[in-house]
Each structure stands twice: as C-alpha cells, then as structure tokens.
Amino acid sequence: MQLTIKGKNFDVSDRLRDYAERKLGRLDRYFNHIISIDVEFADEAGGKRGNARKVEVILNAAGRMLRAEEVGSSFYASLDAVVAKLERQLRKFKTRIIDSRRGDGEADSETGFTTSSAERGGIVRIKRFSVKPMSPDEAVMQLDLLGHDFFVFRNADTDSICVAYKRHAGGYGLLVPEAEP
C-alpha cells in the first residue's frame, strides 16, 4: 500500500505523520486490496470556521475510490473522524462484494470472494423516474426537500436535461449540457 501525506499551508510534523501512518495502516484489516492512500492536512486559518484543521483522505481500494474529509479543532481529532468514516465505507464495500456472489463472476485469488461483473465496474442498478420541467431554483428546492445530493430535472426555459447538486464547499451547482459542434 502506497501512503502519501502532504500539508497545505504548513509542514506536516514527524509526530503527525507517524500518527497518520499508524491510523491509516490499520485500514487494511477491513479490506486487504488497498492500493494507495493520499492524505492532505490543511490549516485553514481565518474564515468562517476560525482556525480549522481539515483532513482529506482519498483511498484507492481495488480500483474503487473512497473519499472522506473532516474539519475540526485539531488534526488528530479530524484524522480519527476520517478513519472512522473510511472504516464504515470499507465495511460497506466489502459487504457488497460478499453479497454479490452469484456464481457468474471470477474468484479473487487473495480474498476468495467471487465478484460479479457488476462489482468490476458495470451498472448494478437502473432507476427510472419522470423528469419534470421546472426552473433551477425549483430543482434546488426539490433537492433539499428530498435530502439528496443531486436532482435531475428538465429546465423549463431551455428544455434541456440538467442536474442540480450540492457542493462540498457549500452552495449548489448546476450541470447544463452543451451541444458539441
């Protein structure tokens, strides 16, 4: 497993680096196909959050990317919270692999689990829904009412299919398709 640790707006101390290596090294007990882990510690002084200590981790587990971030008053507390999030994600991911055994996949030599073609990156679910014409503001309201991270709708002004989504940095985004020349 390759571990990359970097700091944004400060230098990562040896003590913090050792702590991160120890905590993140334990994740392989939840899933033993972790290829790489990228950690970024960011010191976000000032702003709305005061002196916030942000930890973001991107984990490559057998070609699947898992991501977690946490902002807190210390890097150690933020890292602990991120590791807890990643543990939950890895357990869920491993459970999906185990539950998907249908006999139509290939056996993994290291874990012995059988993975279906869906677990190797195919479509695992199709959901059909009606796309109603509405304004982007109405779509954002629907997104909030449903509690989802995104909402697909037909823009009443342009008659195109659009996606409203919640941004991690706060606020909302809108994906608007453009015709290729």
Image: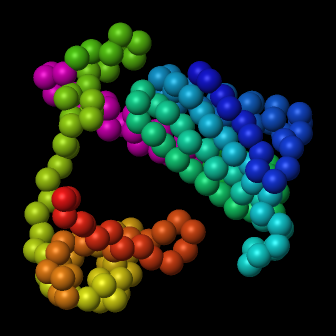
The residue located at (45%, 76%) in the rendering is 172
Residue 161 at x, y = what percent?
18, 72
**Residue at 81% over, 35% down:** 17
* Left/right of residue 66 with respect to residue 48 in the rendered view: left
Q: Which residues are magenta?
A: 84-105
Point out residue 150 in the picture as x, y percentages from the top left corner. Answer: 34, 69
The reply to whether residue 51 is in sight is yes
Residue displayed at 36% across by 73% down: 174
Q: Quadrant of the C terminus?
A: bottom left
Which quarter of the image is occupied by the N terminus? top right
| Residue at the limit of the structure toward the top, as seen here | 109
For residue 50, above or below residue 126 = below
- The colour scheme is rainbow
Name the residue rendered at 81%, 53% in the picture: 9
Q: Is residue 35 above or below residue 38?
A: above
Q: Report whether 38 appears left or right of 97.
A: right
Q: Is residue 41 above or below residue 134?
A: above
In the rendered view, does 161 fall on the left or right side of 120? left
Residue 148 visible in rendering:
no
* Residue nearer the viewer, 163 or 116: 163
Report the number of numbered marks: 0
Task: Inspect the magenta stretch and tell me whether residue 101 lies in it.
Answer: yes
Q: Position of residue 51 (x, y in %)?
A: 83, 68
Within the image, what quadrant is residue 155 found in? bottom left
Coordinates of residue 144 in the picture (x, y in percent): 38, 81
Please tell me whether the stretch drawn in magenta is mainly helix, strand or loop: helix
Whether 56 is among the magenta residues is no
Residue farthest to the front?
A: 181
Would you identify the image quadrant in which residue 179 lies? bottom left
